[in-house]
Amino acid sequence: MTVYWLVWDAAAHWIVERLTAEGALPHTARLRAAGITASARPPAPNCQTPPSLATLFTGTWPERHGVTGFRVPGTGGPVEESSAAFAPGRCAAPPVWRTAAEAGLRTAAVHVPWTIGADGQAEPGLDVAVEAYSDRIDRQAALPLTGGRDHFAVGPHPLDVTPEGDRIRVRSGGRSVTLGEEDGDWRQLRLGTDSGVWLRLVAAGGRRVLLRTGAWRPRVVGHDRALTDAVAETLPVFAGEGIGPTYRTGGLGPRLVDGGDGSAEDLFVSSMGCVHRSFEAPARTVLARHTADLVVIYLPTTDDLGHELIGWCDPKSAAHRPDVADRIWRHVRTVYGWADRLLGAVLDRARGRDTVLLGADHGIAGTAWTVHPNEALIAAGLAARTPDGALDPARSSVLYHPADNGSLWVNHQGLPGGRVPRSTAGALLDRAESALRAVTEPGGGRPVTAGFAPSPGGDPAVVRHVLFDPDFLPTARLRPDHAVVAPSRKPGAHITNNGDPRLHAIFAARGPGLTPGADLGTVDNTVPAQVALHQLGLGPADRARPLLPDTPARRVCTAT
């Protein structure tokens, strides 16, 4: 018996519902018809990917697992060094695979965080663990060509570009690849022994441009040598994200919403194909060769796509663009279709007593505006700039934390008077809250904030969390023009959770004891981990309650 758990990053329930109704996700429909389905609430107050994955995989909230954003602030104030959320040991609660290992069960994990220890070895019970995000060499780039010989670099690796008639040859070390505009696809180029990039030659902005993905060093470790070797041998060049930043800034030509003809979107989505291939190949190798009790597979493509496109298809967002929404939605259908195809492979691999779970860490909503909370705090006299325009913590009383996890902090560091008394700190936070409540979208429309909340694990007299309206993407950066709110170039986001159902994740599962076709409505996103444990025979009795109480066979395990 095996539990297969496929995770689509940012697969919002509302998006999956619409695509399934259109017939675009046949394998998702197949899974949902064969088992239970639900809309799953992500963690609050922050629902970025790290806290949301920690909640999904541990079945606990941030108060327990301690992951509160991509970076987790320390306790001394906003200028204290913060720690990386995906660092080994950063998640304080045990993920499902650790509980499984303690019971003698084995796991195979494909690009799943918290599966490799600080020593670089797989955690106990991991037959194989594939991971690459922790070692990025360089970000994606669009490289304009001169028509002659060009020289670029990817981290420490040189790229030499030489014209060969209508084509170009790109060399790095002893390897090379030849590209032409008519190729219409991306090609891999290995860099050294442990990394590489995907390349494509295009015409953009009236000149030839060499597009390349970012570069990472993947690692494959595990306690099953045969499986580990098989996965390592079949890995393509790893691409962890598409060329969204270049698309966003017009480097592929104007976007549809900026008057483009759709070619920029075509190029961006084609880069997402490189990402999908990077994740699909090891997943299929694991599906074909594993003997594990638990198989966990992560896909990022639905999240990457959502950040760049989804707002224009979101009728509840001010970013909605009915004039281009149908053309954009075709790309959403394409990328989700790739993910659905991999789900089909999982369903085909699973046997009668196996369980298949489809989940997501969070959903995603349209984003029309970028909000700069520190600009509002400066205007309120609570924060200050340095002479060169940067944020000056030594002269600031309250800051929106540079970790960008939604939190306001009373600053204890570098102030001439030393530590701020608790009574004064609370009053400072109240002033900061009032300043942010007064900020609205340009023209005096909606407030940018939807509420305020305690920060998980934080001292309420020192830190407070802002719940932003989903249409407002917060950033700790300052602006040269001091604007507090400005149009957003990124039309999809999921930073703070104010309860908006667009931020709910998809959840579906089939397996022994799970009633076919049962819709659970809305559940907490702690439920999938408890279902996985229950199906593995590890659900503790004192935490079990019936989600579907008609018969004992319908009992699944969930956190109370």
Image: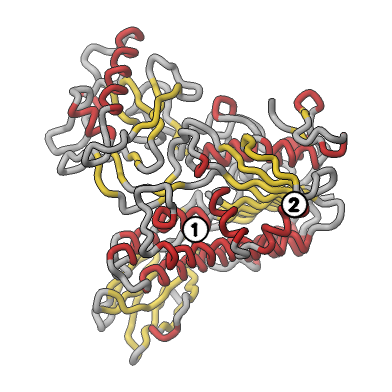
What label sits on residue 465 in the rendered view?
none
Colour pattern: secondary structure
Q: Which quadrant of the structure image shows residue 455?
A: top left
Mark 1: give few (<14), some (14-19) or many (20+) Cα within 10 Å: many
- Residue extending furthest bottom? 165
Q: Nearer the viewer, mark 2 or mark 1?
A: 2
Q: With 519 as the anchor, is 541 left or right in this view?
A: right
Q: Where residue 330 sits: x, y (%)?
A: 49, 67
- Residue extending furthest left? 387
Residue highlighted by disc 2: 356
The answer to which of marks 2 and 1 sits earlier in the sequence is: 1
Q: Nearer the viewer, residue 401 or 438?
A: 438
Q: Where residue 218 sits: x, y (%)?
A: 55, 57
Measured Cα–Cα span from mark 2 to mark 1: 25 Å
Amino acid type at circle 2 is: Val
Asked if the residue under mark 1 is in contact with the one under mark 2, i.e. CB atoms within 8 Å, the reply is: no
Residue highlighted by disc 1: 240
- Could you tell me which secondary element the residue under label 2 belongs to? strand
Q: Where residue 489 sits: x, y (%)?
A: 31, 53
Quadrant containing the C terminus is top right
Q: Nearer the viewer, residue 55 or 236?
A: 55
359 in relation to 204, above or below: above
511 in relation to 333, above or below: above
